[in-house]
Amino acid sequence: MSLTTAALRATLPVMFGYVPLGMAFGMLFQDLGFPWYFATLMGIFIFAGAAQFMSIGLLAAHAGLLEVAVSTLALNSRHIFFGLSVMSRYNCRGLKKLYLIFGLTDETYSLITGIPAQSHGRESDYYLAITALNQSYWVIGCTLGAMLGRMIEFDTRGMEFALTALFLVLLIEQWSKVRKPYPFVLAAVCGLGALLLFKEQMLLISIALSLVLLVLSRRRLETGG
Amino acid sequence: MSDLTYLVLVILVMTAATFLTRAVPFLLLHRRADHPLLIFLGRYTPPAIMTILVIYSLGSVDISQPPQGLPELIAALLTVTAHLLWRHALLSIFAGTAFYMYAVQSGLFL
C-alpha cells in the first residue's frame, strides 16, 4: 500500500468529521455577511475548529484584537501538551516540520500517536500526508458551508459523531499498545472531575492536571506499576 | 477601520495565536527532543489525552432531556464492540456514525 493510500485510509474518519463541522462553521460565518472566501482563508490560515467557531461570536461582537488574542491562546493552550508528546516523532527539518507543527490539531495528533506508520522509515512523509489531508477536508468543509449556506439539501445531522467514534477507536488502540490502566484511569478521573467542575475550560484543565500527575508518578509507571 | 480590515486583522491575530500554542514546546525544547522525560511523555500522554477527548466529546450530551443520551450511548457501544471484534477502524467508525445519524435524524428514542 502506498504512503498516500495509507494516509487516505487513516484520515477517512476525519473527513467524515471535518467536512460537516467545517460546513457548520461556514454556514454560521456567512450569516455575518462577509464574502464566502474568507471562510476558506480562515480554514487555510487558522486551521483550528474550536477557535474558528469562537471567532463567530467575537466578530459579531466586534471584539478588540487583544481579546481575540487572549481568548485564542486560552482556547488552544492544550496544544502545548500535544507538541510535548510528539517532539521525538517530529524529527524532520525546515518547512516540512513547520507545517507539521502548524497542523497539529486534536485529530491529527490522535492519528499520529495512535496508528503506526506503515511506511518504511519515511514517517515524516506519512505525518505530512495525514496533516495535509486533514487540512484539506477542513478547508473544503468551511468553503462549502460558506458558499452554499442554507441551500444544502443533504442532511448531515449526526455526522460529527465520526470524531467521537474516531477517539473511541484510537483509545482502544492506545490500550493495546500501553496495557497499563494507570494513565487511562488517571485521565478519566481528571476528565470527569473537570467536566463537572469547570465545563468551559474542561480540556485544558484536565489535560494539564493529568500530565502533571503522570510526571509525578513517572517512577512508578516505569518500574512496571 | 473598515469591516474587511477588521476581519483580516482578526484572522492574522488568530493565526499567530494558534500557531504559537502549537509551536511553543518546539521553540523552547528543540535541543532536548531525546530527553527521557519527553520520551516518557510521548508514551503516556496519548492514552491520557485520548481518554479525555472521549469524555469531552460525549460530555456535552444532556441526559436530563429525552432521549437521555441513548443515541450516543448505543452508537459508542456499537463502535467499541465492532472494534473489539474486527479491529477495522473504518468499519467501527462507520457503524457507530451511521447508527447515530439514523437515530438523530429519524427521532428514534424520542
Image (spheres, rainbow, N blue to C red):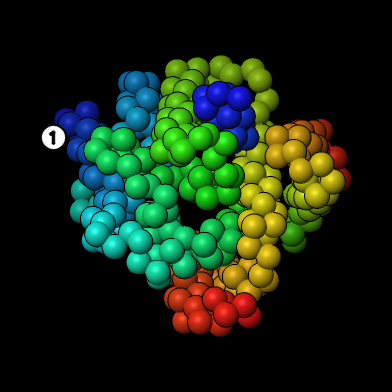
- Element type at mark 1: loop
Q: Which residue: 34% across, 21% down? A: A37
Residue B67 or A49: which is nearer the viewer?
Answer: A49
Pointer 1 local density, CA inside 10 Å: few below 14, some 14–19, many at least 20: few
Q: Residue at x 52, y 34 (%)?
A: A119
Judging by the rendered image, the residue that carries numbered circle 1 is B1
Residue at 18% of width from left, 31% of height from top?
Answer: B5
Residue A137: give x, y in percent of width and height. 50, 27
Closest to the observer, B22 or A51: B22
Q: Can I make out residue A216 in this image?
A: yes
The answer to which quarter of the image holds residue A36 is top left
Instruction: Give the image quarter of residue B59.
Output: bottom right
Q: Give the x, y percent position of residue B79.
A: 77, 45
- Name the amino acid type tagged 1: Met
Query: What chain does mark 1 sit on?
Result: B
Percent x, y of residue A88 = 39, 54
From the viewer's side, name the closer residue of A219 and A42: A219
